[in-house]
Image (tube, grey):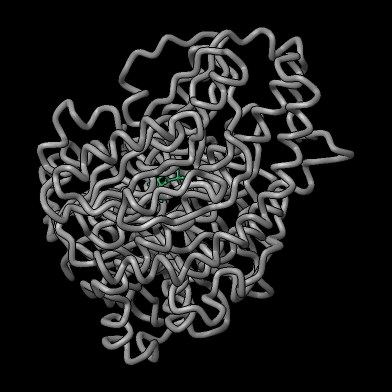
Amino acid sequence: MCGIIGYVGAQQASPILLNGLSKLEYRGYDSAGIAVYDGQALNVKKAKGRLKNLIDITKNGSEPTGTIGIGHTRWSTHGRPSDINSHPQTSGTGNVAVVHNGIIENYMELKEFLISTGVKFISETDTEVVAHLFEYYYDGDLLSTMQKVMERVDGSYALGILCKYHPDTIIAVRKESPLIIGLGNGENFIASDVAGILNYTRDIYYIDDKEIAIVKSGSVEIFDMYSRKIEKEIFHVDWDIEAAEKGGYEHFMFKEIMEQPKAVLNAISPRIKDGRISLDISLSPDELRGFDKLYIVGCGSAYHVGMVAKYIYEDMLRIPTVVQLASEFRYSNPIIDKRTLVIVISQSGETADSLAALREAKRLGATIVSIVNVVGSSIAKESDHVLYTWAGPEIAVATTKAYSTQLACIYMFALFMADSLGKISEEEYIAFIHALLKLPEDLKTVLELKEVTQKLASYYFNAKHIFFIGRNIDYAISLEGSLKLKEISYTASEAYAAGELKHGTISLIEEGSPVVALMTTEKLFDKMLSNIKEVKARGASVIAVTLDNARDISDEVDHVIKIPYIHPMMEASLAIVPLQFFSYYVASMRGCDIDKPRNLAKSVTVE
Ligand code: F6R
């Protein structure tokens, strides 16, 4: 979603802002802009479309000149993408400029109020009210003005504000939307995401909800709503910029698919000590025995990881496990109390719906374990226990390595619980550990399927509609395979529990319909074969994904993709890889913008 950057120091601000915005492009956006104080006025440049348009109108960052500025990439919520609706938004006098991530929920009411005072609005955005309110409440002091504005606005926000009356200061504030301060030498930065400032500094402050940062070239002061000064610890970012660069690959998505063996190794190896799972989670066997229900929440692919987890946890732990979309959870009046363990899964740790679900579950008394990639993110901070996925930065909008490391964490947590609760025999435990240790190597093996899947993509990239079917964990994989395909290649696709086909969907199958059939759940192999026969009888072309030790079915289907046998509960990790490649190649053959699919954002920080 939207990205924020800000700079104050001795260097020209515009090139630094543009560079920062280029590092935030991956989040998804439809317009971009900057405001720089040039010694006399706040000079605003903004343009609809790709960052390239802004680079052109700023003559490659050579104007506006000035050493303090803010910048933004916008992903439209209120008001269509346009030059005028782009940020920064300014007050009527042009003396206040604002960049904003999030949604001001009561903006209509504030707009009416401001109009009644004579203010004229020029954009359709919710953000413009903040610029006018700031000007309206301005009392000569940035901190108290900001506090007055915050008392009036409801919703979520990360804001960067420049005010002409204080030309050496950026004001930064957040509520339910991420914001960090980058600390330099004689210069400082604000950003919505570490990637935006990593070219300049690795030392950062995380800003918490309703904290206000007064950022100058030589100082950063942080206050709460009552003007009390807050001391922050400096957090040193240890991943480097190369991790957020393409490293010779054409797309981040491809690079991230290829990184999966290493990412999964990073997630697993520090957590297996002397053949036992050792998690950085302080839940005792007694505490674990106190839970009579598991709830798993997430959005999109994270939810699909939850679907895999449900099959594993109910089978292994015999504890009822509900998996729910975070956006549904928060309004569903869930049956949760202190005997419920809620697992929140999120790559970014900032997804608004997942964060809201976490808060609701906490309010109802549940214990929260989160599985998160971004260190220090809101979900990580607000959980009782965190399992970091340690996948490194994921830049492509479509998740791949984060999905795989989330699965790895799900397996390890299952084993940790099963062992603590005495629900697994020593033999089964050892077999599971063995499979976990083998997983990174097996992932390397499935990466070799890229040529095969590229060929398959060349047969089917023009298909209007592609189906995915499976049962049990294979159904969960089907959902993820189908989502990958539709989000990056814009191919209509549906995933069905194979046994459900004949209850309606099979009417969509016609001559030549491509059907990807997942068959990695050994006990359901024959059932799947029956479903394959049903679709074949109606003319479907079937691509089957089977285990390499499975019965040969090449006469019954059109193509077979074989993956190694690893463990009945862990096949999702291997089966998803050919589906990731397949989506990637279909999208590439269809000429799609693979890393930044239309209308999508990497981190969905609004509801
Ligand atoms: C799909 C994808 C999304 C995310 C979803 C949740 O490829 O990436 O479906 O999985 O938006 O995001 P996080 O994991 O950041 O909460």
Q: Residue at x 70, y 28 (%)?
A: 415
Is residue 206 rendered to the left or right of residue 39? right
Residue nearest the observer in this picture, 314 or 426: 426
Percent from the top left, x then y, of residue 295? 49, 20
* Place of residue 163 in the rendered image (x, y in percent of width and height, measured from the top left): 38, 63
Residue shown at the point (39%, 91%) measured from the top left: 62
Look at the picture and state if 221 lies above or below 58. above
Which image quadrant for residue 54?
bottom left
Quarter of the figure that contains the N terminus: bottom left
Q: Position of residue 240 (x, y in %)?
A: 66, 70
**Is 71 positioned to the left or the right of 359 in the image?**
left
Q: Is residue 191 left or right of residue 107?
A: right
Q: Which residue sits at x=60%, y=28%? A: 369
Q: Nearer the viewer, residue 411 or 523?
A: 523
Q: Residue furthest front?
A: 555
User: In the visual, does 282 lie left or right of 533?
Assistant: right
Above or below residue 228? Residue 56 is below
Q: Is residue 207 visible?
A: no
Q: Residue at x 89, y 39 (%)?
A: 274
Using the rendered image of the protein, determine whether residue 70 is visible from the camera's viewpoint.
Answer: yes
Q: Quadrant of residue 371?
A: top right
Q: Compared with residue 214, is residue 24 higher up or lower down, i.e. above or below?
A: below
